[in-house]
Amino acid sequence: MRILKKIKDFLLNILYNAPRVLFINFYKYCVVRIKVHSLKKIPEDSSAIFAFNHTTGSDPIIVLGALKKKIYFLADSDRFRTKFTNFFFRKFTNSIPVFKNEFVKNLNSFKEIFSISKNKKIFFGIFPEGNLIKNDKFGKFKNGAAYLSYKTKLPIIPVYIHNIHKGPKPGTWCDRNPICEGIYSLFSNAFRKINIFIGEPINPVAEEIYKDFKEFTDKNSYKRIIERITEELEKEFLQLKEEAESLVKMKSSKNKLKTRNNINQKIYDKNNCPLNEKKTNKIFMDNREKYKEFEEDDEENFERHFDAGTENIISNPGK
């Protein structure tokens, strides 16, 4: 009987996982463009908790495709109210319900979480903001991720999802319906380039977190530690957002300079300027070297240097 049960569980596991794996990979490679930055920060041989910013209901599908990990998500219990949504979130996104008001029901959820975390390598996913935030800002971070990290002794890895389409307009019926919102968001992000930025892991047993509280012995000391972990998490997300915005600015400036370079080249070709090849190469090589220092320089100063170099070529083509 045990062998038959194992065979049954194995077949059911394939039945439930195959559609999910096929859909996630199809979505990642054929529908949306995803680039992951700093993937090496994810530990290879140990478990961890991923903390994500939450913009749309399609976030779990996107990060599952991006990180290529089996992640157990902690989701609002409202997502599990019907048999269909319960099946979808349980089997399709590996979600575990967390109850905001009926705390007694969370006992079973936490038993499930701690049972799963006993395995050698497990990843949990949690959205510390709790709700969908669609105003390009972060919502107030709740302590759920920090609490889970403290109890399981697993590090939290902040993951920032950047340049994602926000889905249906807030307040509409589609926005209020979780399934409709998720499907709408999946389609609205089709062919969109999404960047995933991975931050530095936050270790709950790190000395810098515990040192301020080692003298406390009262039962509330753990609350202070959890608040400290949440503060560190917020700082990491702000840094990741700044990194993402800087990258976008750099690419925009690079495209502008590339366009300007092409225009100058057309000017040379049109006027048949007898350019001195050695001097031309030297000036453009200087421009490339300056571009490498662009992150430490001001955009306006760099563009002024670029314009001066190209103007010198046009004004003195034969020298």
Image (cartoon, rainbow, N blue to C red):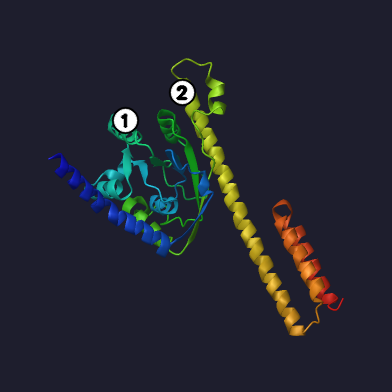
The disc labelled 1 sits on which kind of residue? Phe
| Percent position of residue 275, x then y | 80, 78
- Look at 33% across and 55% down and name the residue there: 21
Circle 1 packing at 10 Å, graded few (<14), some (14-19), many (20+), is few
Give the quarter of the figure containing the C terminus.
bottom right
Q: Is residue 167 left or right of residue 137?
A: left
Q: On residue 214, which mark appears? A: none
Give the quarter of the figure containing the N terminus.
top left
Circles 1 and 2: CB atoms closer than 8 Å:
no
Whether residue 23 is visible to the viewer of this picture, yes or no, is yes
Q: Which residue is mark 1?
A: 103
| SS type, badge 2 | helix
Q: Is residue 224 above or below residue 184?
A: above
Q: Quadrant of residue 78?
A: top left
The disc labelled 2 sits on which kind of residue? Tyr
Circle 2 packing at 10 Å, graded few (<14), some (14-19), many (20+), is some
Q: Is residue 151 above or below residue 291?
A: above
| Percent position of residue 312, x then y | 83, 71
- Which residue occupies the foreground of this view, 12 or 88? 12
- Which residue occupies the foreground of this view, 304 or 7? 7
CA gap, disc 1 and disc 2: 19 Å
- Which residue occupies the foreground of this view, 262 or 252? 262
- Look at 39% across and 39% down and name the residue there: 121
Q: Residue furthest right?
A: 319
Disc 1 or 2, which lies upstream in sequence? Answer: 1
| Percent position of residue 236, x then y | 55, 40
Q: Which residue is mark 2?
A: 222
